[in-house]
Amino acid sequence: MGVLDELTRPAKDDDHVGGAPARLVAAPGSTEEAAALVAAAQGLAVVVRGGGTKLHWGPAPRELDLIVDTSRMAGMVEHAAGDLITVLKAGTPLDDLELGGQQLALDHPPGATVGGTVATGASGPRRLHYGTARDLLIGITVVRPDGTITRAGGKVVKNVAGYDLGKLYTGSYGTLGLITECVFRLHPRPAAHAYVRSTAPAQAVPSILAARVAPTAIEVDSATGELAVLIEGTAEGVRERSALLGKLLAGEITDAAPAWWGLPPWDADGIGMKLSVPLSKVPALLDAGATVRGSAGTGVLYAAASGITEVERLRALCVRGGGHAVVLTAPSPVRDILDMWGPVPGLALMRRIKDQFDPAHRFAPGRFVGGI
């Protein structure tokens, strides 16, 4: 019996990606087992599945033979508190992290895993202060499509042809191989926090940034017309800075986040977009007629589009403003006729990297920019 026979099972009805059904599913228990599986699966089209919270993001794969499920590669390998780092297996649910007085400052939906969050490059409100997965990731272990195990950054290391593997694999949607372990920079858990909630317009954001209150997040929601700012730090510092900000914005200071905080604005079966623009263009997006929500402090927002016409209108608005827009999720009939990624700079380079890492284009074929 070969490795494929030992590690795989027939797919069930719910083993699909964007409506594309798989034939086989495997859940390796270690990096070494995953490498043996991938090496034995030459000729098969592979998609990696973590918690499944973003598996519906992006186009469906052109082909799908094998789903590699990371649920058995879960747990903390190391927590070096003195160095403010942790090493986590890719299938570790972010909800399960116990880091004492420290935190991995990645916003995530319930059930999201370490590998899925890195592979999709997902982020949330706190990206303003802490950065994104790309910023917090300092090391990575991957299984390349030929079955080679490669470690880079962080605690070791062996790199490949001078590439920064952590940055390449972050947001690659599983098209370059299988992430099995990640090394992250940690931050101290703040002693106190407060939210300043206001109906001030997004044009107030430059004043917030200039006020030197060091906000952790500045979020807006067009549906409620609300602007909310998260302040973290010592109890005294939070009290002073939130009071200053409350006067500036004529806002209310609370311990609780707004109900919409950190949540996508689209329905489960709706069209969801990610919009990235310069800060000066955020007010125009909020006035564009769609439900738009996200970080006014970084210019990364999310929109619920009512149809393809609105997708095109929002995308054009972003491009004219010097940004870009991608469709993260959409119902199958829309997904089939929509360019979900839209125009993206650097496509030729991305194709060359894909050709080098996955010459047979077996991993998540068609899921990434330009049909990569």
Image (cartoon, rainbow, N blue to C red):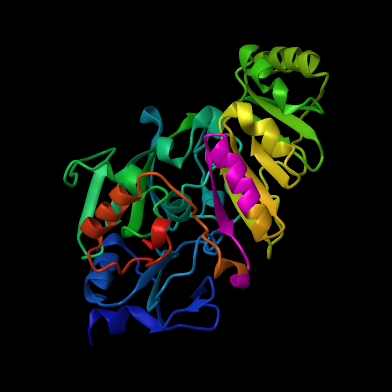
Quadrant the N terminus occupies: bottom left
Residue 73 visible:
no
Task: Report if residue 289 is visible in the image.
Answer: yes
Name the residue: 56% across, 30% down.
278
Instruction: From the top left corner, tell me how far across and down residue 15 is, in percent.
Output: 50, 77
The picture quadrant where one finds residue 306 is bottom right
Instruction: Tell me the quarter of the picture where residue 289 sits.
Output: top right
In the image, taking residue 21 as reference, residue 82 lies left or right, namely left
Q: Is residue 354 left or right of residue 125?
A: left
Q: Where does residue 221 sit, x and y in percent of width and height?
A: 74, 39
The x, y position of residue 342, in whole percent, is 49, 53
Q: Nearer the viewer, residue 358 or 239?
A: 358
The residue shown at (40%, 62%) is: 371
**Quadrant assignment for the C terminus:** bottom left
- Residue at left offset 54%, top offset 75%: 19
Nearer to me, 296 or 346: 346
Asked if residue 326 lies in the magenta stretch, the reply is yes
**Spot occupied by residue 326 in the image (x, y as percentages of width and height):** 54, 51
Q: Write the start and end of the magenta stretch as one range.
A: 312-333
Q: From what the image shows, is residue 224 above or below residue 151?
A: above
User: Does residue 113 lie above or below 68 as drawn?
Assistant: above
Q: Residue at x 77, y 43 (%)?
A: 259
Front residue (pair 107, 351): 351
